[in-house]
Image (spheres, rainbow, N blue to C red):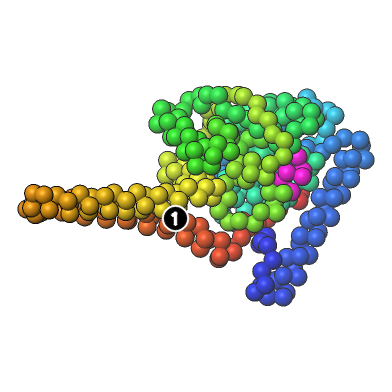
Amino acid sequence: MIDTPANPLEPLGHAERRVTDMGERETARRATREAAHGGGRKLVSIVTPAYNEEECIDELCRRLQQVFADNPDYDFEAVVVENGSTDGTLARLTAIRAADARFKILRLARNFRMDGGITAGLDYVSGDACVIMTADLQDPPELIGEFIRKWEEGFDNVYMKVTRRVGTGPVRRMNAQIFYWLLGRMTGGVFPRNVSDYRLVDRKVYETVKGMHERNRFMRGMFYWAGFSSVGIEHERLPRFAGETKAYTLQVIELAIKGILSFSYVPLRLITWMGLAMSGFAFAFLIYVVVRAFVWGVPFAGFGTIMGVMLLLFGFLFTMLGVVAEYVGLIYDEVKQRPNYIVRDTFGL
């Protein structure tokens, strides 16, 4: 089953099947909400992508169950997105679901990374609010209670603001600071600094984000771009409970580039500004050369100077082409209209 926006070129039978699946899923979500409201309690959904997290899953679910018990005025459902794991994550999840039906499993055909997993989970939740968190317990589940209280105060988007990254090396911390500084500068300071994906959003917020069908998804940026009343809760970002990090340096850099290019045209405008500045400098230098030739005569043209200028200009040129190529690549992904995720199986959904 593939979840994707309607495509005018899609075969009729496929389109009918997709619409039927979406209709059945919406009916199931509505029934879940009505069952929760029948008891007079609001339903809070939790979405957590899990990729090779067999060492963390049991502890994650145990702590979530404690959160459920500590907030008896609410009903909960947890949609764990099994994001193409190659270890025993799915086996652990099915055992947990057999013991507690509030845990539901969405199994994807392969790894679609964090943002793809979040996108998939949001399409299957049914809550009045939705909590988005990682499965490695760097996002402490105990903070959900505070999220709910802020939500009840009227905030539609309650997120964790990282005060300190415990157990993270200096390079990773420096990269994070540079990324948020660049993002803030290139978007006019729209995005707050040190905001994580860990958040609670009201249904109207996540439904709005679900309506954004772009392929290059920077989810924390999309939630903030959507607007609505927002507030941050400061907390340390904890080290992983167990297992190996999935935030490899190249993937983090790729995500940072995608986030900046998806929400800012400044890199394109920099090309124009650099071109105008270089043209102005060249024009002024040309006037200087002409005046100097009239006053002191034509100087001997140095080979090193000429080569240096040429290499400098070619460096600028290819840098500008590289920026344009990044934007063209994003456009290419959008034009292909491939789905953001592919579902392999569901359990309880």
Q: Is residue 8 above or below residue 267?
A: below
Residue 148 picture location, percent across and down:
76, 30
**Would you say 89 lies left or right of 308 here?**
right
Q: Looking at the image, which residue is at 77% across and 27% down? A: 149
Q: Looking at the image, which residue is at 9% across and 54% down? A: 298
Q: Looking at the image, which residue is at 58% across and 38% down? A: 190
Residue 24, by quadrant, is bottom right
Write down the residue under mark 1. Answer: 326
Residue 267 picture location, percent across and down:
44, 49
Q: Quadrant of the N terminus?
A: bottom right
Judged by its main secondary structure, the magenta piece is helix
Q: Outermost residue toward the front?
A: 295
Which residues are the magenta region?
A: 200-207
Q: Nearer the viewer, residue 154 or 26?
A: 154
What's the amino acid at mark 1? Glu
Tag count: 1
Residue 315 in sight in this render: no
**Would you say 101 lies left or right of 112 here?**
right
Residue 117 in sight in this render: yes
